């Protein structure tokens, strides 16, 4: 395998990035938080020697189109897949049948065989080859690219409050929009930008109508109705909050790179656990997401490791699950968002599907989505699952209609 450079510079802030995984198409700058597309020339390629002796003539591409979702499969030249074999068998039966009928009855044999074929064989063939349409997993979608009301420009963060309102934040321009539960536009406002182009890394909503926005190394508290800033939460030596959410008692918990920070309901620091993941994994972290269940267990999703770490309400480590792979429960390319339903089941999105686990991390099932990559997951009070998707849209999944859950 060709050796890639050990680091390259972030095109957004110019910082030198070390220990970048060049096997993936993107990386996140640990300094400015920007998601960077790794240039094609720097990505690691499979060693061609690994395919020595492989005869590509035995494999041909087969594209299967299922309700807009495409996957490339393989078929052998010997049969052409299940459909090819089925058609071949039908052709053989047809040829033998019509020949036999003609030999036995040269005058009426062909018409007799065609009558039998139309009444018995053709319906069976149609039943075997008719594709059952796959239901669209997205029950509601809204948005689209643009600057007008209800349109987005790179909306990576989203929050839902207890009244059904949905808040969506663009990544770099400081714009936040409010929508109804049905996706109808209601209001918008701009966050004050002390540093032009600084990203909005997270947004959360509490029970009192206050938004908590991670931006420029601070957590800003914003009046959700007016868009006016209430105050800012800043902690010494904590520079870049990636996610903030709420404990069952109304207190806050936030992650910043590899630090776990607890606040009271007024934003005063209760405790800081430094290097809380590095002490367990030995891996410098970035791209963290956060969710909390009804008893205070904290679930931290590591995009870099494709793993979920479980902590108790004090930040004490309990367990870990998840990995990149192709088996059931594994993550495709990169795990990108996490949410918890009212039962306590864990939902983790990757680049093609949403995996569902028990509270202990046991895999249950999954469902696929067809376009874009999910950057945020959030449940509302009705247990409807909403997602921010990197094609400038918000999705709603009605999970109960997609998968059977215990």
Image: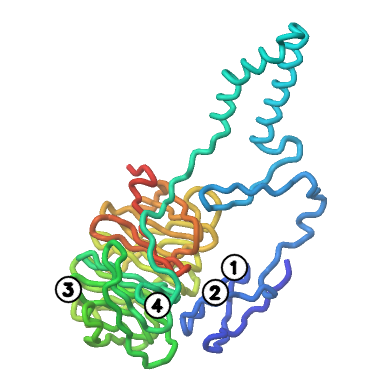
The residue located at (74%, 7%) in the rendering is 105
CA separation in Å, label 2 and label 3 = 36 Å
Label 2 or label 3, whichever lies nearer to me, is: 3
Q: Secondary structure at mark 1?
A: loop
- Say which label, 2 or 3, has the lower sequence index: 2
Q: Which residue is mark 4?
A: 170
* Label 1 close to label 2 by CB (< 8 Å): yes
Binning the other alpha carbons within 10 Å of mark 3 as few (below 14), some (14 to 19) or many (20 upward) gives: few
Picture quarter containing residue 162? Answer: bottom left
Label 1 or label 4, whichever lies nearer to me, is: 4
CA separation in Å, label 1 and label 2 = 7 Å
Binning the other alpha carbons within 10 Å of mark 4 as few (below 14), some (14 to 19) or many (20 upward) gives: many
Number of numbered discs: 4
The residue located at (39%, 68%) in the rendering is 143
Instruction: Residue lying at the far bottom in this picture: please name it.
Output: 194
Using the image as rendered, state which of residue 124 and residue 322 is in the foreground. Answer: 124
Label 4 or label 3, whichever lies nearer to me, is: 4
Using the image as rendered, state which of residue 39 and residue 61 is in the foreground. Answer: 61
- Picture coordinates of residue 66, whole percent (x, y): 54, 47
* Quadrant, the C terminus: top left
- Picture coordinates of residue 206, whole percent (x, y): 22, 72
Q: Which residue is mark 3?
A: 208
- Picture coordinates of residue 172, whole percent (x, y): 43, 82
Q: Which residue is mark 2?
A: 27
CA separation in Å, label 1 and label 4 = 24 Å
Label 2 or label 4, whichever lies nearer to me, is: 4
Task: Let me know if residue 254 appears in the view.
Answer: no
* Label 2 close to label 4 by CB (< 8 Å): no
Q: Which residue is mark 1?
A: 24
């Amino acid at each position: 395998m060709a050796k890639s450079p050990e680091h390259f510079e972030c095109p957004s802030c110019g910082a030198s990035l070390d220990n970048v995984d060049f096997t993936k198409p993107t990386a996140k700058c640990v300094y400015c938080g920007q998601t960077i597309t790794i240039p094609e020339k720097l990505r690691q390629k499979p060693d061609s020697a690994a395919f020595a002796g492989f005869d590509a003539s035995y494999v041909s591409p087969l594209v299967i189109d299922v309700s807009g979702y495409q996957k490339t499969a393989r078929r052998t030249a010997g049969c052409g897949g299940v459909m090819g074999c089925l058609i071949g068998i039908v052709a053989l039966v047809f040829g033998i049948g019509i020949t036999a009928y003609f030999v036995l009855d040269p005058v009426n044999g062909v018409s007799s065989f065609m009558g039998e074929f139309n009444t018995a064989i053709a319906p069976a063939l149609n039943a075997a080859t008719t594709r059952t349409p796959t239901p669209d997993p997205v029950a509601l979608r809204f948005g689209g690219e643009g600057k007008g009301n209800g349109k987005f420009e790179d909306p990576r963060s989203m929050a839902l409050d207890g009244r059904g309102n949905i808040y969506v934040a663009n990544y770099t321009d400081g714009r936040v929009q409010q929508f109804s539960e049905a996706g109808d536009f209601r209001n918008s406002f701009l966050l004050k930008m002390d540093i032009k182009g600084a990203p909005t890394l997270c947004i959360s909503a509490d029970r009192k109508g206050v938004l908590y926005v991670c931006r420029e190394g601070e957590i800003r508290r914003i009046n959700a109705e007016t868009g006016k800033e209430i105050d800012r939460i800043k902690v010494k030596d904590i520079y870049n909050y990636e996610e903030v959410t709420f404990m069952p008692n109304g207190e806050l918990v936030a992650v910043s790179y590899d630090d776990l920070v607890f606040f009271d309901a007024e934003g005063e620091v209760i405790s800081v656990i430094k290097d809380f993941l590095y002490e367990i994994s030995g891996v410098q972290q970035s791209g963290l997401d956060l969710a909390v269940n009804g008893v205070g267990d904290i679930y931290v999703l590591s995009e870099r490791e494709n793993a979920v770490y479980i902590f108790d309400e004090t930040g004490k480590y309990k367990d870990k699950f998840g990995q990149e792979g192709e088996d059931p429960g594994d993550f495709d390319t990169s795990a990108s968002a996490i949410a918890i339903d009212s039962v306590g089941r864990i939902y983790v999105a990757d680049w093609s599907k949403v995996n569902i686990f028990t509270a202990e991390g046991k895999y249950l099932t999954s469902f696929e989505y067809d376009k874009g990559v999910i950057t945020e997951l959030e449940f509302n009070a009705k247990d409807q699952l909403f997602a921010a998707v990197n094609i400038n849209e918000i999705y709603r999944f009605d999970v109960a209609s997609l998968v059977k859950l215990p």
